[in-house]
Image (cartoon, grey):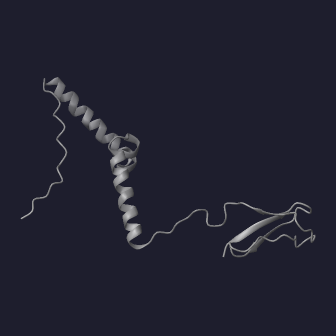
Amino acid sequence: MPTYEHLCHICQHEWDEVYSIKQDPPMICPECNSEGHVERLVSGGSGRGVVILTGRELRAHIKAEGTRIAKEAKTNENIQANMVGEERYHQQALQTSQLTNELVKIGKETPPTPPAKSKIRRIG
């Protein structure tokens, strides 16, 4: 059952009470016994919107999150650097730049980017 917070507008007393969502909220303040001046407060609650995933749901969530991050890393340098390590990322970028400069010096163009691999599988 949920825990609800309440406030009495007469004496400013705040308290928590546990009862069913189908049950009517209290109308009498336990501190000053005034009736009709009690309000149920709306708060974030104790769960804070946390959902615990287990089993297949967890695996599916992790796989989807990994796919999303990998896709985003293709266009975002910051994510790429975080995935491989900032120092290694900058070393790779420097090496690529140096190789490109060497190719330009000897009069060759930079090699074309290889096409993406197809995910078509042969059956049989």
Q: Position of residue 123 (x, y in %)?
A: 9, 62
Q: Is residue 3 above or below residue 104?
A: below
Q: Residue furthest left?
A: 124
Q: Does residue 101 appear left or right of residue 68 in this picture?
A: left
Q: Does residue 38 appear left or right of residue 86 in this picture?
A: right
Q: Position of residue 83 (x, y in %)?
A: 37, 50
- Picture residue at 37% right of the left edge, 64% below the top: 60
Q: Give the tally of numbered discs.
A: 0
Q: Is residue 91 above or below residue 46?
A: above
Q: Is residue 89 above or below residue 19?
A: above
Report which quarter residue 36 is drawn in: bottom right
- Picture residue at 17% right of the left edge, 42% below the top: 115
Report which quarter residue 29 is drawn in: bottom right
Q: Nearer the viewer, residue 43 or 21?
A: 21
Q: Position of residue 48 (x, y in %)?
A: 61, 62
- Picture residue at 73% right of the left edge, 69% below the top: 4
Q: Position of residue 65 (x, y in %)?
A: 39, 57
- Picture residue at 87% right of the left edge, 71% below the top: 28
Q: Is residue 118 above or below residue 105?
A: below
Q: Does residue 10 appear left or right of residue 71 in this picture?
A: right
Q: Does residue 22 appear left or right of residue 116 in this picture?
A: right
The C terminus, quarter of image: bottom left
The N terminus, quarter of image: bottom right
